[in-house]
Amino acid sequence: MKAIINVALKQGVLDDQGKATHHALDTLGFKDIVKDVRIGKQIIMELNSSNEDEAKEEVTKMCEKLLANTVIEDYQIEIVG
Amino acid sequence: MKAIINVALKQGVLDDQGKATHHALDTLGFKDIVKDVRIGKQIIMELNSSNEDEAKEEVTKMCEKLLANTVIEDYQIEIVG
């Protein structure tokens, strides 16, 4: 079983990395098409678990304890396979 | 229109960040459930475009030029909304 966890900065939190990337894209000639860029993390985890609910519960604990800084970041968990 | 771009290290490329996270999860008591961790980037982009094909083409160019290091990374593009 696999978990895909997307961790992104909350709306309103300054995203330096996204801003720098946006600026770089502007200078590369994509100024007209790019309106906003935000960058987060995608964590892909292989799990020893056959129960989807249990897996999601464990991954939620991992996010709260380590994977996300819940003061400034939101996370989404998707369990697949 | 919005593009979601997932950039991940290719299979076989050492993922230090993933390894460190895996180790940290082991020490936090998730040793039994976590088999493997890999960490990539998720880039969320707002686009000034109403044509899905054109948007995908432009974003592919951005990935090749800036967003992904295609020697060691793979990318996936999803156009939504």
Image (cartoon, coloured by chain):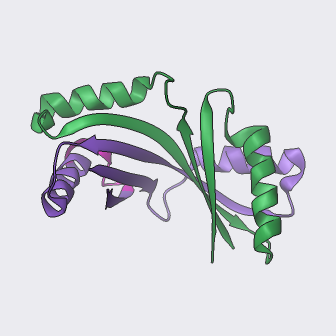
Chain colours: A green, B purple
Is residue A18 toward the left or the right of residue A9 in the image? left
Is residue A80 toward the left or the right of residue B68 in the image? right
Is residue A7 toward the left or the right of residue A33 in the image? right
Q: Nearer the viewer, residue B12 or A72?
A: A72
Residue A56 placement (x, y as % from top left) = 75, 61
Residue A63: quadrant of the picture:
top right
**What residue sits 21% from the left and 34% below the top?**
A25
**What residue sits 32% from the left and 25% below the top?**
A20
Residue B18 is covered by the magenta coloring: no
Q: Please identify the residue farthest to the right as the structure is shown.
A: B29
**What residue sits 78% from the left and 65% below the top?**
A55
Residue B62 placement (x, y as % from top left) = 21, 46
Q: Looking at the image, is B28 positioned above or below residue A9?
A: below
Q: Quadrant of the C terminus of chain B?
A: bottom left
Residue A50: quadrant of the picture:
bottom right
Is residue B73 toward the left or the right of residue A46 in the image? left
Residue A31 placement (x, y as % from top left) = 13, 33
Q: How many marks?
A: 0
**What residue sits 50% from the left and 64% below the top?**
B12
Q: Nearer the viewer, residue B22 or A8?
A: A8
Residue B72 is covered by the magenta coloring: yes
Q: Looking at the image, is B14 positioned above or below residue A29?
A: below
Residue A39 placement (x, y as % from top left) = 43, 38
Residue range highlighted in magenta = B65-73
Q: Nearer the viewer, residue B2 or B40?
A: B2
